[in-house]
Amino acid sequence: MKELIIIGAGPAGLSCSIYASRFKIDHLIIAKTLGGTLLEIHQIQNYPGIGEILGAELAEKMVGHAKSYGVEIIQEEVTKLSALSSSAPSFEITTESGKTYQTKTLFLGLGTRVRRLNVPGEEKFLGKGVAYCAACDAPLFKGKTVAVIGGGNSAATAAIQLSELCPQVYLINRGETLRAEPFWQERLKEVGNLKTILNTNVTEVLGNEVVTAVKLDKPSNGQNELKVEGVFIEIGATPAASLAKNLGAELTKGGLIKIKPDGSTTVPGVWAGGDVATAQEGLEPRQIVHAVSEGAAAALSIFKHLRGTETKV
């Protein structure tokens, strides 16, 4: 039985692992993807001490740092999570391959799942012109006209990234103004091949074998159909907290895991952090630096729980 198992390998989970290694906590990481939502971010320009870096590059550095301490990483999806005992907290984790792992404590860095637009054609053309990650899929649309749906930072950065590869990019936002940070809004104004369409909804994704257009609820240049070859849906994400809910952890109405300042949840022996937890509730966009600090704080709290001692990093 491990002392700690970390589910998720985003900034929070990797930070927790790095500190757990330094505290000599016997642990492992289970995660389907290494890097979490960092892999979906094109450019990061506000991480202290680094300046500008690609999300995938920062993910690689964080994963490499965690691995440098010798942590075991199981790259699988967790399918089941259950408590073994109510008297002394312990847990069993089952992965997609059917393997099981047992642990005294848990850290849940589960992250989020992309939010769907839920319009006709979205599911049909997934992978055939509909995408949710510009940082992942932008190169596949080089030379094509594309639409980005959304008004936050992820939509703005996706539009900027795609403008470097595509002859024409449309940024479609349902609101009258964009929610992106002023920095990114200024960058958008500098892009010559980008047109922003405000106060407009995409009501359908159209095509035959692949995407050929999107239908709008208001005319743009006198047309209710906008011809595009790709649609990037960047409208946020929802917490992936179902595993925590099954354990009985208290969630907010928005589905976030409620945590204390040390990352502990309402379930003894379970900690959480990152985008799935409440520490950043109300802060949009959520920040990598916060997730990293939450992972570190949780590792210290877990150390105290396991050893019953005080320590400094």
Image (cartoon, rainbow, N blue to C red):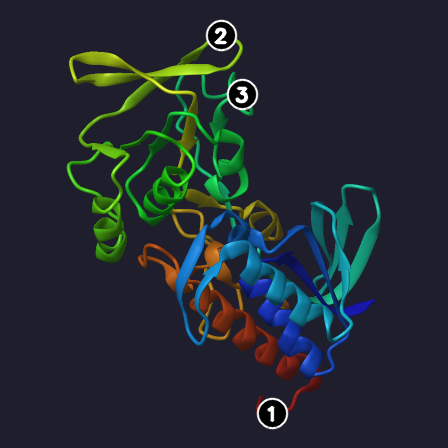
**Residue type pointed to by label 2:** Asn
Residue at x-position 69% and y-position 50%: 81
| Image quadrant in which you'd find residue 282 | bottom left
| Residue in the foreground of this view, choosing between 291 and 162 | 162
**Classed neighbour count for the residue bearing mark 2: other residues with Cα under 10 Å, few (<14), some (14–19), many (≥20):** few
139 w.r.t. 146: above or below: below
- Whether pointer 2 and pointer 1 mark residues with C-beta atoms closer than 8 Å, the reply is no
- The kind of residue tagged 3 is Lys
How dense is the environment of label 1, judged by Cα within 10 Å: few (below 14), some, or many (20 and up)?
few
At 45% across and 43% down in the image, what residue appears? Answer: 238
- For the residues labelled 3 and 1, the Cα–Cα distance comes to 53 Å
The residue singled out by tag 3 in the image is: 128
Q: Is residue 138 left or right of residue 280?
A: right
Q: Which part of the image, by quadrant, shows the N terminus? A: bottom right
Q: Is residue 250 visible?
A: no
The residue wearing badge 1 is: 311
Amino acid type at mark 1:
Thr
Name the residue tied to disc 2.
208
Which numbered disc flags the more N-terminal residue, 3 or 2? 3
For residue 98, the mark is none
Dot placed on the residue nearer the N-terminal end, 2 or 1: 2
CA gap between label 2 and label 1 equals 62 Å
Q: Is residue 255 visible?
A: yes
Which of disc 1 and disc 3 is earlier in sequence?
Answer: 3
Q: How many marks?
A: 3
